[in-house]
Image (cartoon, coloured by chain):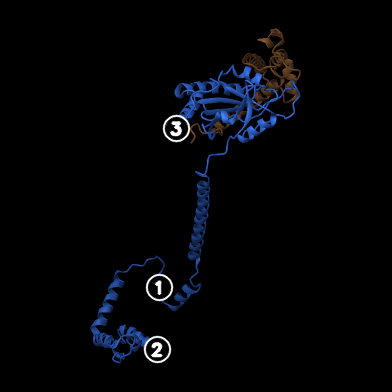
Chain colours: A brown, B blue
Amino acid sequence: MGWFSSSETDGVKKTSGGAFEKPSRTNRAKCYEARDAFFECLDRNNILDSINTKEGVAAAKKACNEQDVVFEKNCAHSWVEYFKKQRVVNYQKEQTIKRIEAQGGEIQAPQLPTRGS
Amino acid sequence: MATSCNCVAAAMRSLRPAAAMRLPLRSPPCRTFTSFHHSNLQRSSRTIWRQESARLSGSQRGTQQVQNLANGLRGQSRPFSSSTPRQKLKTIQQVKARNKGGPFNLTAAVLFIATAGALYAYFTYEKERMARKRIAEQTKGIGKPKVGGPFDLIDHNGNRFTSDDMMGKYALVYFGFSHCPDICPDELDKMALMYDKVVEKCGRVLLPIMITCDPARDTPEVLKEYLKEFHPDIIGLTGPYEKIKDVCKAYRVYFSTPPNVKPGQDYLVDHSIYFYLMDPEGDFVEAIGRNFTADQAAKVISDHIKDWEGPLKKKDRWA
């Protein structure tokens, strides 16, 4: 595809603002792959938060800089921020659910009924 | 009336066993009663009265019977309450002590407050229940929720697409944007699955529509490129920011696209992620959330399509 010709090492083609020039399934797949590699590295180094705190950013840069660079290269910048924040939120969500279930409560997320009127 | 009162009083007195014999019952005392009647009636009623008085005055036996009856009743009777019966209060002091507080005592006060409280609680509950019922009846059956409405946008081929183009078919409307990181692509994949399942069951009577919340970046060309990866039948709609804003408002969709973006700017759009099922007349049928699997959603849509009794267009210009 046209916008993909700019060699693999450069990652996906992006606009000056850091967004995907054209979001496609292939681009997304590459981005997800880079994200998973980065998160795996964070897991290995026991880092949860790589964006919200100064220490977290520093720790992530020290331990997983290589993967972070690839991540930034393959994803829109807004996506990188989104996924990094999502990682923290998802972890907190899991912990909350575990805590409530340990207390014997039941989790019922607010959602539409699967069979409406 | 004085005489009549005397009459009644006398009759009452006559029932007392001791005084029964001393009463002046032979006098015709009840003129007040009889005077209301015609003369012949007067005569007959007088006779009755005379007979009555004769019976009363004449029979010591009658009073004896009354007393026997009373005795019998007393023997059988049981008190209704466990409180001390009045006749057991022997001395005047006891009676006075009992009646000192009048009818008010602790038991009565507790009963009164409990009853008042219970009544208050009951009426409050009933009042609230009636209010809820009234609201339910007010909203019930008055109409479908106002979701959706007319719009005038541009499809992914650059052609004009208005809400009229949705008429005659069911439409599954989704709001999204091509730069969406993870949820929208998943939802659009699901939409493609849903669409294929519905087509398989019901034929081509459903329009899968994706309206962008990010018109600045999602031009018809971008949408065309983007959507063909999900399903070639999905119709992508875009337009000027103001028109997109109006559509989002009509469909009660929240979105957070900045109105003035520079070319190439990198941002994300927060938006509602429901599928809106619209019927062939453009009325909202049901919202399908993220918790539905493709199978569940396809079933819901197919059921609605099967329920539809009006005409359905099977052909379209996008086929």
Instruction: State whether residue B6 is above or below residue B312.
Output: below
Can you give x and y, in whole percent of width and height, for residue A32 in the image? 64, 16
The residue carrying mark 3 is: B307
Q: Nearer the viewer, mark 2 or mark 3?
A: 3
Q: Circle 1: is it few (<14), some (14-19), or many (20+) Cα within 10 Å?
A: few
| Image quarter of the N terminus of chain B | bottom left
Which of the 4 quarters of the picture holds residue B10?
Answer: bottom left
The residue carrying mark 2 is: B2
Q: Are marks 2 and 3 on the same chain?
A: yes
Can you give x and y, in whole percent of width and height, for residue B222 in the image? 66, 19
Q: Earlier in the sequence, mark 2 or mark 3?
A: 2
| Chain of the residue under the numbered disc 1 shown in the image | B
Q: Amino acid at mark 3?
A: Asp
Q: Nearer the viewer, mark 1 or mark 3?
A: 3
B204 lies left or right of B244: left
Spatial distance from mark 2 to mark 3, Cα to Cα?
Answer: 85 Å
Secondary structure of the residue carrying tag 3 is: helix
Q: Amino acid at mark 1?
A: Arg
B149 lies left or right of B76: right
| Chain of the residue under the numbered disc 3 shown in the image | B
The answer to whether marks 2 and 3 mark residues whose Cβ atoms lie closer than 8 Å is no
Q: Nearer the viewer, residue B179 or B53?
A: B179
Spatial distance from mark 1 to mark 2, Cα to Cα?
Answer: 34 Å
Which of the 4 quarters of the picture holds residue A109?
Answer: top right
Secondary structure of the residue carrying tag 1 is: helix
Q: Circle 3: is it few (<14), some (14-19), or many (20+) Cα within 10 Å?
A: few
Q: Which mark is residue B86?
A: 1
The answer to whether marks 1 and 3 mark residues whose Cβ atoms lie closer than 8 Å is no
